[in-house]
């Protein structure tokens, strides 16, 4: 990736249309049926904790984070993460995840959770979420529910139905 001049910046409202195009190309219409997408429908993502990769004024990848809660505890839900096909396998997605997790760490978010492939996310600090603690609105393979705990022990308090934080967080 050393031959690429890429800037990683916080997401702005002006990026929304291209991010939607990138996500549509990466995940297709099936993305609307996924559990994480249904949670995200509950409210907005946190733009200050969401990032884009830009090459020559062109957004080539993005990652978003959304506040969620269960059992009165909050977490960040990472995703979607997507990179334009022409720019895949160059480390852009991994760098976006690193930046997003660092941003979560900088504000002392308790943890970042996601639904994804462990071989991709494990080197980035994600581990399998403990089974049976949270319920998503649709079935999710337990091996794909991952967490990067920022505040030690915080995962123990995230229990019950996982929802968008704007919907039902009782703190």
Image (tube, helix red, strand yellow):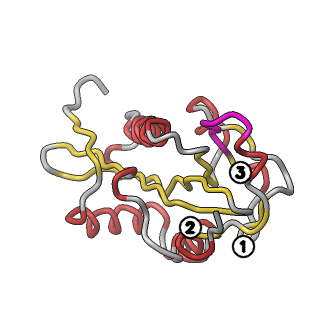
Residue furthest toward the front? 171
Residue 39: image quadrant is: bottom right
Say whether residue 85 is visible.
no
Q: Which mark is residue 165?
A: 2
Task: Estimate the spatial distance between the alpha carbons at disc 2 and disc 1, rounded to whole Å.
Answer: 17 Å
Identify the residue at horizontal 51%, vertical 76% (top origin).
Answer: 41
Task: Estimate the spatial distance between the alpha carbons at disc 2 and disc 3, rounded to whole Å.
Answer: 22 Å
The residue to which callout 1 is attached is 138
Asked if disc 3 and disc 1 are in contact, CB closer than 8 Å, the reply is no
Q: Is residue 131 left or right of residue 165?
A: right
Say what secondary structure mark 1 lies in: loop
Q: Nearer the viewer, residue 47 or 83?
A: 47
Which is more N-terminal, label 1 or label 3?
Answer: 1
Identify the residue at horizontal 26%, vertical 44% (top origin).
Answer: 9
Residue furthest toward the right? 132
Labels 2, 1: front one: 2
Identify the residue at horizontal 78%, vertical 46% (top origin).
Answer: 156
Which is more N-terminal, label 1 or label 2?
Answer: 1
Q: Position of residue 146 (x, y in %)?
A: 68, 46
Q: Which residues are magenta?
A: 147-153
Q: Is residue 77 left or right of residue 50?
A: right
Say what secondary structure mark 3 lies in: helix
Which quarter of the rendering shows the N terminus? top left
Which is more N-terminal, label 3 or label 2?
Answer: 3
The residue to which callout 3 is attached is 144
């Amino acid at each position: 990736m050393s031959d690429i001049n890429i800037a990683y910046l916080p997401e702005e409202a002006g990026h929304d249309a291209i991010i939607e195009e990138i996500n549509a190309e990466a995940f297709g219409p099936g993305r609307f049926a996924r559990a994480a997408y249904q949670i995200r429908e509950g409210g907005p993502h946190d733009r200050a904790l969401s990032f884009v990769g830009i090459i020559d004024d062109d957004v080539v990848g993005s990652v978003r984070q959304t506040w969620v809660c269960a059992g009165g505890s909050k977490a960040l839900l990472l995703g979607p993460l997507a990179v334009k096909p022409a720019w895949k396998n160059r480390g852009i997605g991994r760098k976006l995840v690193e930046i997003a997790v660092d941003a979560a760490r900088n504000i002392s978010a308790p943890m970042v959770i996601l639904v994804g492939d462990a071989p991709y996310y494990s080197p980035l600090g994600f581990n399998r979420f403990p089974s049976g603690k949270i319920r998503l609105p649709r079935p999710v393979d337990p091996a794909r529910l991952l967490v990067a705990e920022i505040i030690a022990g915080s995962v123990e308090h995230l229990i019950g139905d996982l929802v968008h934080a704007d919907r039902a967080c009782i703190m």
